[in-house]
Image: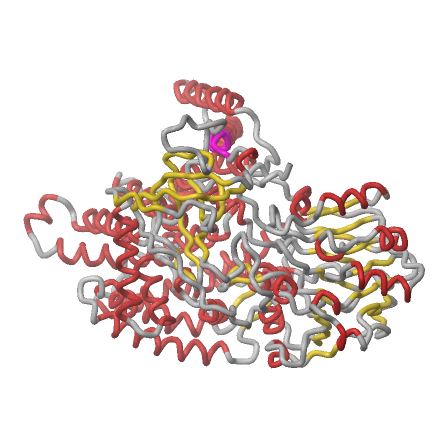
Amino acid sequence: MAGSVLGAGLQLQQPALWPATVYACAGAVSIAVLWLMGQQRQRVGRANWPLALMLGALMGFALAGARAAVYAEGALDPALEGRDLQVLGVVAQMPQRGEGALRFRLEVESARWAGQAQDAEPRELRRWPATISLGWYAENTGLWGRPAPSVTQFDKPPETPRPPAALHAGERWRMTVRLKAPHGNLNPHGFDQELWLWEQGVQATGYVRTGARDVAPERIGGTWQHPVERAREAVRDAVFARVADRRLAGVIAALVTGDQSAIDRADWDIFRATGVAHLMSISGLHITMFAWLAAAFVGALWRRSARCMLWWPAPHAALVGGVLLATLYAVFSGWGVPSQRTVCMLATVALLRLTGRRWPAPNLWLAACAVVVALDPWALMQAGFWLSFIAVGVLFATDSGAPREGRTGAAARLLHMFREQWVVTLALAPLGLLLFQQVSLVGLVANAVAIPWVTLVVTPLAMLGVLVPPLWHAAAWAVQALALLLQWLAGWPFATVSTGAPPGWLALCGVAGGVLLAMRLPPSVRALGLPLLLPVLLWQPARPAAGEFGLLAADIGQGNAVLVRTAGHSLLYDTGPRYSLESDAGHRVLVPLLRALDERLDTLVLSHRDADHTGGAAAVLAMQPQARLRSSIEPSHPLQALRPSQRCEAGQQWEWDGVHFEFLHPLPADYETAGKPNAISCVLRISNGHAVALLAGDIERDQESALLRREASLPVHLLLVPHHGSKTSSTAALLDAARPRIAVVQAGYRNRFGHPADEVMQRYRERGIAVVDSAHCGAMWWHSRAPDAWRCERSTAQRYWHHRVP
């Protein structure tokens, strides 16, 4: 068991896949040898357990690799990227509705080139991805293939977006789409979206084309496919129709249907700050709790029948009933990957217990883990796996089946359940610190109230509301009462503590310390967990030496976000784009990145007002209350209400730790004559005497000419390419004057603007300038002590599921 888990973990470290036949042969050899060892068990004995471990690892390696190789065969053909296709398919999941957008998953039944006659033989299109994720965007939002008016995160579009057509799970639709390979942002310690899409079976992403020249999407009719998804959608919509307050309705819908996107982002921030986020989604701990409650209910009913008791023991019936009801709950809540893992764990443990054998807790734990990893090897790369696995392992290891001897009755069982939840909270706290670099100091208090309240009051009311809808109002009142308490706790000083992401060996120490504190051991042994946690709490990420500086160009898609670090100070230049009306680079990328690096920003520079530079500013400012804001945004800009901004002007300069910072543009007069925001982009030069970096924002050729008139010689080592490589920037005169060795392009993969332009890149190539773009590189590290070198996250952290840009 341990060998198969180890082998799967090793296979997940492969940067590229081998042919499927290699994995098949390796698996066949391991199975054959293990079978022979089983036949010769008396002769082999226990001395050859290392060989058995190696063979088990080989089998786990081969099984994970073979599945990955088969799945990779269905990847999107690069020839189909960026071209209009007409697809026919069935909506496979309940759609996610946002403000001006509809997102859904489509199981493709057929595909052809757009504009081709329906009765014609498909031309050149021999294969297509089986499952695709699509966005259907309303007009006037700027979220799809047509530019919209320049708006900030806080502005409203000039016209009310027309929502997409009604679309439901199980329906068959024909529509014109534009696809691209699954490509996500890749940052250190960040969320791996490409792995998540791989695990979900999504082989392409894209959007629905609804332009004047496109054939309008057509509903072909309903089907009998995906009835559970249709039922979930009906329940979710009924909750929102019944409960007026959308924030309360979102929590209820999430608890019943597993639709976590229904919860408001601000509420998620409060839940994480108070350590109760695991209760507001269908997590492993949630399903485990439901299984125990269901088992208690089934056992109580079973004991009321003498005939049932004679036919099958009540403990066995309770165990099977709890697992079956938990499975039904997991299926109705979306059958997400965390739910699948937890059900597999519960079913494995239940099966082993039903055999009547008293397996040691470690054996039960490893058996459950082996089954889960065999079904989903990529779970080993997900934080949710470790959270749910350790939570379930702690609960089973502490024997949560019944209260201690001598204590009976409902009150004793309730107290016992509270104790186990308290133990789980303690066990998961250090793990949360390691995985998310944040732990709630008020979490124990919040969970002491929230766990019984959500488990025994909110969730039952929310689920019974499916049968008796007025109960959703009672559930909403219960959620509101809890929200008031959580808001109060989240407002406490030092409600959360954050640390930088430690190296692997420190992470192992922290996990070991958390396990020791949670297990039933003598106090003297449990106390050893405290010193094991100290290295994690005291860890400080390395910083540049005095007189040096480093840059991290974050992978945020179409936009700019560059972190500049000296020995004792930090500056963030721009905050990336707004991805949708509900999501931005601040929450999704920059806040987790700054927390993992344990950064305390001294200054935030927003080069100009465009949304691809200020999209994540509100989230960053909320996380960094001490940061000073410098920008060219206008006095009436909504960000000024969050943090008053000092206007950037040419000539402003300061020094940190022997590193010189200076604004080169704009001039004070430029604010009066600029016709668009790009003209007053803040241009920042950073130097330390032997290395120079220039962050140029979105200046265009006129601003480049004006800059060169003031700075006749502008040599730099690293240049943040102006305007993401647009045709309007990077003139030959600028490149000749700057003579950069490295040019960094922060632009989204297959972005709608065509950045960087081919003719611009040709100018860089002609001058021998190395161009590093975020689509190929991911996040890029650069340091002044080695100004000719750089490091790409996609190279150092390359795995076979990561998209390789041609």
Res 165 quadrant in image: bottom left
Residue 456 percent location from the top left of the image:
28, 68
Q: Quadrant of the C terminus?
A: top right
Q: Is residue 73 magenta?
A: yes
Indicate how the structure is coloured in the image.
Answer: secondary structure
**What's the magenta region?**
68-75
Determine whether 597 is above or below 786 in the image: below
Residue 540 percent location from the top left of the image:
70, 62
Residue 460 percent location from the top left of the image:
25, 65
Determine whether 330 is above or below 31 in the image: below
Viewer-nearest residue: 481 or 306: 481
- At horizontal 49% and vertical 29% (from top left) the residue drawn is 73
- At horizontal 35% and vertical 77% (from top left) the residue drawn is 480
Specify whether 774 is left or right of 254.
Answer: right
Residue that extends furthest to the left in the rendered view of this protein: 307
Viewer-nearest residue: 496 or 106: 106
Identify the main secondary structure in magenta.
helix
Determine whether 282 is above or below 320 in the image: below
Whether residue 91 appears in this view of the structure is yes
Q: Is residue 429 magenta?
A: no
Whether residue 528 appears in this view of the structure is no
Residue 304 percent location from the top left of the image:
9, 57
Res 794 quadrant in image: top right
